[in-house]
Image (tube, rainbow, N blue to C red):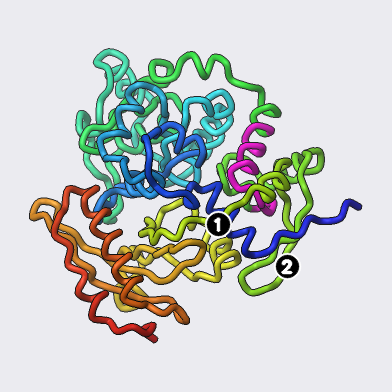
Amino acid sequence: MTARLEVSNRSARWLWLQVNGLAQAPTGPVDVIRMIQDLGFVQIDTVRNVTRAHHHILWSRNQNYREGMLWPLLEQRQLFEHFTHDASLIPKDVLPYWRRQFQRLGEKAARSAWFQSGLGREEVAKIRKRIEAEGPLSTHAFDSGARGDEMWARPPHKKALDQMWYAGELATSHRKNFVKFYDLGERVFPASLHEALDDEQAIDKLHKSAVDKLMMATPGEIQRFWDATTAGEVRNWMARAELVPLRVQGADGEWRDGWGAPDIESRLDQLTPPVKRLRVLNPFDPSIRDRTRLKRLFGFEYRNEMFVPKAKRRWGYYVYPLLEGDRFVGRVELKADRAKGWMLVTGFWPEPGVQWTERRREKLFRELQRFARLAGVFEVDARLVRESGAKPLG
């Protein structure tokens, strides 16, 4: 059996930050498509705490990015919108091997009781015919009324639209003020779907690209990256794939087995330390999306507590991890009013063992100012950081 390549924790952290675009200074010309291609996709989210997650994720890689740069790329068909682990914008180059995901999610939605719209086939067909005749329409163009008393109940037409969207029968034409407009799938991405790969080729492409974006991975991490294949399909692919057997050291000093991309040795040989920039990361940032991997590599425990009852939260509603160089040094909760032009630090939690010197506080304040400018905000109140004392809080 081939000996496993050992990757120290420091090298693992440096490599992970490099493949996530967080090792270099976030400056220079903005190439949004290239950033998303390097990441694989960018998750989109409805919540706008300071700015929406997709904008923050891209800004973290290049702080010359601005909010108006993303959505035109969807209208230009450089990106398409669909579901990975969540709603995401995906480069058009992925479309030839995405047909299986349309099929998988379309069938899943059709079986799901939650997606049963209560509309008959003729009613659903009328929705499709309206879009075919009138062009892209949002959910606001229809009115079928919510059926059910639950707070999350959606009107039947919305469920019907989403079921056809998951199946690729409908696609996101564009978004206006974040409202999704549905058009026929063949009008949004006709050429790329026509070139679709067969299922075995698609699985190979999905897994190869996942390993390339992860660089070091377990079988479960490969599967969860796109969330478009099964555990059995991952195992079958790995049995014939050319991967490098690894032993990766965690932040706790323990060594765990994993698998690396074919070029991992050359990537490790060329590693350089990440810049010492202090970054405010979004809760949905791909570098921290897998909380288990985050804890294993960085010893940093994090959870998104937006849906946790206030009394049970350990930190806060929308809390941003703070990354400095190759370690997480704390977390901060922010609140902003874009109309009034202010942003306020409402919570600040240094990591145990991290000395928050005046210089580090100043680095955070400067980063908060830069982040606020992304949202068109110029008044930043960070007194909570400045007055919290130089030692970690608890």
Mark 1 near mark 2, Cβ–Cβ under 8 Å? no
Q: Which residue is mark 1?
A: 273
Label 1, secondary structure: give it.
loop
Q: Is residue 245 above or below residue 71?
A: below
Q: Give the image location of residue 246, x and y in percent.
A: 76, 55
Q: Is residue 317 above or below residue 246?
A: below
Distance (Cα) linking label 1 and label 2: 22 Å
Which span is picked out in magenta? 204-220
Looking at the rendered structure, the kind of residue marked 2 is Trp
Q: Residue furthest left?
A: 340
- 66 vs 6, left or right, is left
Within the magenta stretch, is there residue 216?
A: yes
Q: Which residue is mark 2?
A: 255
Q: Give the image location of residue 281, x and y in percent.
A: 38, 57
Point out which mark residue 229 bears. Answer: none
Q: Residues within 10 Å of mark 1 (few under 14, many from 20)?
A: some
Quarter of the figure with residue 197? top right
Q: Quadrant of the C terminus?
A: bottom left
- Residue drawn at point x = 50 percent, y = 42 percent: 39
**Can residue 79 be spotted in the picture?**
yes
**Can residue 149 be spotted in the picture?**
no
